[in-house]
Image (cartoon, helix red, strand yellow):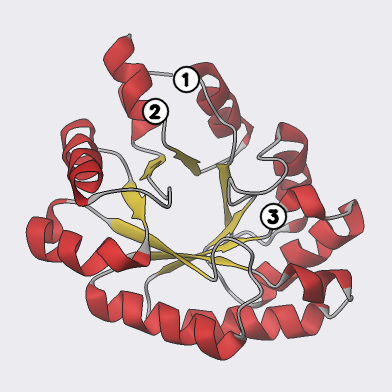
Amino acid sequence: MDKREILRHVDHTLLKAYASWEDIVELCDDAILYQTASVCVPPSYVRRIHDTYGDELKICTVIGFPLGYHTTEIKTAEAAQAVRDGADEIDMVINIGDVKSRLYEKVEEEICAVREACDGRILKVIIETCYLTEEEKIAMCHAVTNAKADYIKTSTGFGTGGATLEDVRLMKQHIGPDVRIKAAGGIATMEEMEAFLKEGCDRIGTSRAVSLLKES
């Protein structure tokens, strides 16, 4: 697979706590130059990116990030604010404690509420696979499908583990036909990105793809 084709599936990501505006500008400039799918950035930068770059790139941001235990009301408010600020895509974290408590319907209801707040923007649901059993992962595949989210996403990149091909294979078996897969967390090489795309992922979340292309 051509490296430029791989980049078209990449959410070019910078979510470090100490990311400066200068760092964000470099991220956005690279995303435009190399035509990545989007930039994935902290919510506080969405408005400034939108005002600076307009329609030159797609803006993705995160909600309930990275631990997922915000209340539904906070998550929906965050999503609505992100949309007002100019976000095109929303990556939300589920309430992992609710999953562990087997409150699967509650998780599904929260996804529905956030989807409503997204007002037609793309919604990706981060289930943080490193903390879940196989049964819980399958339950989340069903919840994401029933809530009509656009993507199920493996990881925040801030947990104890990231994306695995095994988890992607499991998701493929249990999501509905309209749900796509985003892999994120620990994907460090072009070969790994290509492997995840060939396994069926539509998006890759990584901060490394553009730097790898520059170095090649």
10 Å crowding of disc 1: few (<14), some (14-19), many (20+): some
> Taking 61 as reference, is 110 left or right?
right
Give above or below for 114 relative to 89.
below
Residue located beneath label 2 in the image: 209
Give above or below for 165 relative to 71.
above
Q: What distance separates the C-alpha of mark 3 from that of mark 1?
A: 23 Å
Residue 197 is situated, as x and y percent measured from the top left of the image, at 54, 33
Task: Indicate which disc, 3 or 2, sits on the residue closer to the N terminus.
Answer: 3
Does dot 1 land on a helix, a strand or a loop? Answer: helix
Q: Which-is-in-front pick, marks 3 and 1?
A: 3
Residue 61 is situated, as x and y percent measured from the top left of the image, at 39, 62
The residue at the point 68 percent across, 76 percent down is 146
Q: Quadrant of the C terminus?
A: top left
Amino acid under disc 3: Glu
Q: Quadrant of residue 55?
A: bottom left
Residue 63 is situated, as x and y percent measured from the top left of the image, at 49, 70
Q: What distance separates the C-alpha of mark 3 from that of mark 2?
A: 21 Å
Residue 92 is situated, as x and y percent measured from the top left of the image, at 54, 67
Residue located beneath label 3 in the image: 128
Q: What distance separates the C-alpha of mark 1 from that of mark 2?
A: 7 Å
Number of the label disc, if any, that sits on residue 80: none
Task: Report if the CB atoms under discs 3 and 1 are less than 8 Å apart.
Answer: no
Give above or below for 77 relative to 175.
below
